Image (cartoon, helix red, strand yellow):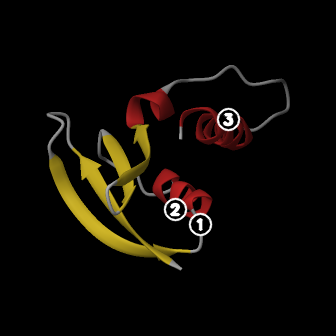
Amino acid sequence: MASYRFYWLGDDGRIKRGENRECSSDQEAQRLALGQIGKYSAVEVWEASRRICRLESAVFAAEPTKAPGQSRGLVLSSLFLALLQSHC
């Protein structure tokens, strides 16, 4: 297990909240951050001086087009996974 630092940022780009978390991998830390962005503008995950990822809430607010019969949750989950793979 490695120690990661999570920073939640406000609209002004300043840190509003910080928290240490233990995760087994960078991917686990990214998944945890994805589910924790909440009301903040962004969340950054760091392991010591190495930034793992930065997730912007504006990306999550986008309204993706959903296929007929597909729930919005599945579309958003697919969007999140694609985001993690391409931006973190």
Marked residue nearer the N-terminal end (3 or 2): 2
The answer to which image quadrant residue 55 occupies is top left
In this figure, which residue is indicated by the disc labeled 1?
25
The residue singled out by tag 2 in the image is 29
Which residue corresponds to mark 3?
Answer: 82
Disc 1 crowd rating (10 Å Cα; few below 14, some 14-19, many 20+) is few
- Give coordinates of residue 20: x percent, y percent: 33, 72
Do the residues bearing badges 1 and 3 touch, measured as CB atoms within 8 Å?
Answer: no
Instruction: Determine whether the residue tagged by mark 2 lies in a helix, strand or loop.
Output: helix
> How far apart are labels 3 and 2 at the CA level?
16 Å
State the residue in front, 2 or 6.
Answer: 2
Query: Looking at numbered disc 1 in the image, what kind of residue is underneath it?
Result: Ser
Against 22, is 38 above or below?
Answer: above
Q: State left or right for residue 1 relative to residue 17.
A: right
- Residues under labels 1 and 3: Cα distance? 18 Å
Which residue is rendered at x = 81% and y = 34% of the image? 70
Around disc 2, counting alpha carbons within 10 Å, would you say few (fewer than 14), some (14 to 19), or many (20 or more)? many
